[in-house]
Image (cartoon, helix red, strand yellow):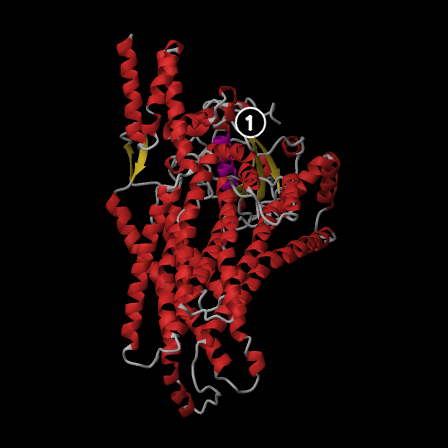
């Protein structure tokens, strides 16, 4: 295959190279394209498969209002364009039709070594200029140092290779890429790498025997799935370990009968939240440096979907780039706010209705079918609210695309905030309603129920209603989430192949199907080797899988962090339940990625992105909620007193200022402590400058450079980047003076 495509030339529009994929319909209707096997197709499809880097799923309509010839012409034209793009950048390809469904082609992509080396060198230079790989000079032994511009592709990890090939496929033509995207190419349905079954099996087997994962395990994930996935598992593992504090304290409070709604417990949880976030930031910096992705956000590439109004010359590179005025971008983002607010409003109404129904059936309803109706709100939470949340997510995604974000990080940030709003409302709205409205003013509802002749046994609305709702979200909600995330895909993964097999057998026994087609399929089977058949089955299986959505996993953990930080005083066992859930979640997510989703594209990342900002927002809110609960539900508080709202607001203001003070103290204390990443960054910068000085001045001045750099070691450790560079520049001047 590699030799075959080595000298491929671009295909001219209107060529007939792939007309065998769109044969005459024969006895079929004029509005249908049937992809049947031909001798030409066999030459391209049934050779031995080389290493496949990516699979492009090419779907075209076979039925429609237009005539068959028109549909075929459009599909042929788009396929020609796709192959032209691949040929232009030097990628090898192989086309295979999907025998299960009409109108679907698989384009298997393999990147030749020469193309990979060229793109790798470009990336190494870009990374060096942006300071991404500067820490390669940290090693003491010169023989162990990697060359920054080393293009030995044998040293690449799977994730690095796939990421580079993905950049070749998706970069714009100005950047030397193929400009292939599901948003740009109308018939490109998806683009994804294939799973490494051997790695997945070993990964699941190893983790099933471990209680906790270590940095070596995270590095293996990074080498295989990329930094973005590795950072998620690093965050989940780190969060799991830090939950041991609230779990132990909460368990002691429950066992020894202490009051959870105490000022001291609220203060402890506030300090824990602040310290955890700041410590995770340090951990994030360390991992970013260790994985060579520090400053990788500077390596921002323009989204293919960003078109702009006109082309202008970039002031730095001198290249022609799309441009759109700042005021137009800001106006679009401002105009999308009412759309987000409208979606959030309707979602809030639905959540509120389900909650009011739950409250009425659980607390007041004593009529017929009470035991059955008792579970109606749970069904609403399981089926209705997730559906509406998905509709909201699709709606805000349309708005986000309309906002014309230039880079992926910008698009991801604004989309994350919109998604966070929806999940925030679903998770916390009912709890806020109970804590701040229903409990303080619920007693005023009881007389109206009597007037409406609704029988009830309540004489007082108390704190247990809030605790019960929280327990539902923490325990029942997480069990339901695990079932929908793991058990449902398992069942579907078992049933769907059987259903498709029955459908295929039914079609095979259909007398209307031509015998020639059956004979052709039999010939195809004989032509295929056992490995090829196994490979195609693997492709079919993975094409049917959904894409991995890291947003759902992140938002699940961030929302859970909100439960722990804001409501642990309501139910002290919140931390313990969350630590059990996350221990299972850590392994469940690994299984989900390996078996129930497509292999994620290995994006680079230097952290968890905007989610850390959302966690800081929840920590700030925890200073409000815990202070208000500690005062409102204190035994000495008269909740119906006219002064209660005033004192509640004062307690909130005091707690909020205390939060600001605690965060300032924690940040100052941690900044005073030495961080491994800061030390390695300074050492790397110094070593890198020494290397360049040796190249500039020659080996004869090596002794002078060493003595000069060592004399500035103490000052360099406390200086910023620009000051340190000035000192080394002075060394250069002194060297020339000596000569």
Q: Residue at position x 37%, y 51% from top?
A: 613
- The percent coordinates of residue 536 (x first, y second) are 66, 40
Towards the viewer: 200 or 134: 134
Quarter of the picture holding the C terminus: top left
Outermost residue on the left side: it is 327
Residue 75 magenta-highlighted: yes
381 to 613, vertically: above or below: below
What residue range appears in magenta?
Answer: 72-86
Q: Circle 1 sits on which residue?
A: 155
- The percent coordinates of residue 485 (x first, y second) are 57, 57
- The percent coordinates of residue 464 (x first, y second) are 47, 76
Q: Residue at position x 31%, y 32% from top?
A: 719
Q: Residue at position x 70%, y 39% from top?
A: 533
171 to 346, vertically: above or below: above
Quarter of the picture holding the N terminus: top right
Asked whether residue 422 is in view, the answer is no
Q: Left or right: where does residue 166 sit relative to residue 700?
A: right
Q: Left or right: where does residue 649 sit relative to residue 50?
A: left
525 to 416, vertically: above or below: above
Residue 664 magenta-highlighted: no
**Quadrant hosting residue 516:** top right
- The percent coordinates of residue 487 (x first, y second) are 62, 58
**Quadrant hosting residue 531:** top right
Q: Residue at position x 65%, y 32% from top?
A: 49
- Main secondary structure found in the magenta portion: helix
Q: Secondary structure at mark 1?
A: helix
Neighbour class for label 1 at 10 Å: few (<14), some, many (≥20)? few
Asked whether residue 466 is in view, the answer is yes
């Amino acid at each position: 295959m590699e030799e075959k495509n080595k000298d491929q030339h671009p295909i001219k529009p209107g060529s007939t190279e792939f007309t065998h994929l769109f044969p005459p319909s024969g006895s079929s209707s004029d509005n249908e394209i049937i992809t049947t096997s031909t001798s030409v197709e066999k030459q391209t499809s049934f050779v031995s498969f080389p290493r496949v880097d990516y699979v492009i799923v090419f779907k075209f309509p076979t039925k429609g209002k237009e005539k068959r010839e028109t549909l075929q012409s459009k599909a042929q034209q788009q396929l020609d364009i796709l192959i032209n793009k691949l040929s232009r950048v030097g990628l090898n390809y192989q086309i295979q039709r999907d025998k299960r469904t009409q109108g679907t082609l698989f384009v298997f992509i393999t990147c030749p070594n020469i193309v990979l080396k060229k793109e790798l060198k470009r990336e190494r230079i870009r990374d060096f200029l942006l300071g991404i790989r500067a820490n390669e000079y940290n090693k003491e032994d010169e023989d162990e140092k990697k060359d920054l511009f080393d293009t030995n592709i044998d040293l690449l990890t799977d994730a690095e290779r796939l990421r580079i090939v993905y950049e070749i496929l998706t970069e714009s033509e100005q950047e030397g890429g193929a400009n292939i995207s599901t948003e740009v190419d109308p018939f490109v349905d998806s683009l994804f790498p294939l799973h490494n079954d051997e790695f997945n099996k070993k990964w699941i087997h190893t983790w099933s025997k471990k209680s906790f994962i270590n940095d070596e395990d995270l590095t293996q994930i990074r080498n295989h799935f990329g930094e973005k996935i590795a950072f998620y598992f690093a965050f989940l593992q780190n969060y799991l370990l830090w939950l041991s504090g609230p779990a132990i304290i909460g368990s002691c409070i429950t066992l020894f009968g202490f009051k959870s709604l105490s000022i001291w417990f609220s203060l402890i949880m506030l300090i824990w939240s602040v310290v955890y976030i700041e410590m995770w930031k340090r951990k994030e910096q360390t991992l970013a440096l260790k994985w060579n992705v520090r400053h990788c956000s500077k390596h921002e590439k323009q989204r293919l979907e960003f078109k702009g109004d006109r082309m202008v010359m970039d002031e730095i590179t001198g290249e022609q780039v799309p441009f759109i005025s700042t005021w137009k971008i800001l106006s679009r983002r401002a105009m999308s706010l009412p759309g987000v607010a409208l979606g959030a409003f309707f979602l809030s109404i639905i959540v509120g209705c389900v909650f009011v129904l739950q409250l009425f059936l659980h607390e007041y309803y004593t009529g017929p079918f009470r035991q059955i109706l008792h579970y109606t709100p749970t069904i609403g939470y399981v089926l209705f609210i997730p559906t509406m949340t998905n509709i909201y997510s699709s709606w805000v995604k349309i708005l986000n695309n309309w906002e014309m974000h230039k880079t992926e990080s910008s698009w991801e940030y604004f989309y994350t905030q919109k998604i966070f709003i929806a999940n925030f409302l679903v998770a916390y709205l009912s709890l806020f309603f109970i804590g701040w409205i229903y409990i303080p003013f619920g007693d005023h509802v009881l007389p109206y129920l009597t007037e409406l002749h609704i029988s009830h046994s309540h004489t007082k609305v108390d704190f247990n209603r809030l605790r019960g709702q929280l327990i539902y979200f923490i325990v029942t909600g997480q069990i339901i989430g695990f079932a929908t995330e793991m058990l449902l895909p398992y069942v579907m993964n078992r049933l769907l192949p059987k259903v498709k097999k029955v459908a295929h057998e039914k079609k095979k026994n259909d007398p209307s199907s031509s015998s020639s087609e059956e004979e052709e399929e039999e010939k195809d089977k004989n032509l295929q080797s056992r490995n090829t058949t196994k490979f195609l089955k693997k492709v079919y299986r993975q094409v049917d899988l959904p894409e991995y959505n890291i947003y759902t996993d992140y938002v699940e953990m961030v929302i859970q962090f909100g439960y722990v930080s804001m409501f642990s005083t309501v139910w002290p066992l919140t931390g313990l339940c969350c630590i059990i859930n996350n221990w299972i979640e850590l392994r469940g997510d690994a299984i989900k990625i390996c078996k129930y989703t497509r292999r994620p594209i290995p994006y680079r990342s230097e952290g968890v992105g905007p989610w850390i900002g959302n966690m800081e927002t929840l920590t700030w809110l925890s200073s409000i909620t815990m202070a208000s609960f500690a005062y409102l539900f204190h035994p000495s508080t008269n909740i119906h007193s006219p002064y209660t709202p005033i004192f509640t607001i004062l307690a909130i203001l005091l707690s909020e200022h205390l939060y600001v003070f605690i965060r300032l103290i924690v940040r100052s204390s941690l900044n005073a402590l030495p961080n491994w990443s800061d030390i390695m960054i300074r050492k790397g910068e110094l070593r890198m400058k020494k290397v360049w000085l040796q190249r500039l001045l020659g080996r004869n001045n090596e002794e002078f450079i060493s003595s000069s750099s060592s004399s500035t070691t103490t000052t360099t450790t406390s200086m910023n980047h620009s000051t340190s560079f000035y000192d080394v520049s002075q060394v250069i001047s002194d060297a020339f003076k000596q000569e």
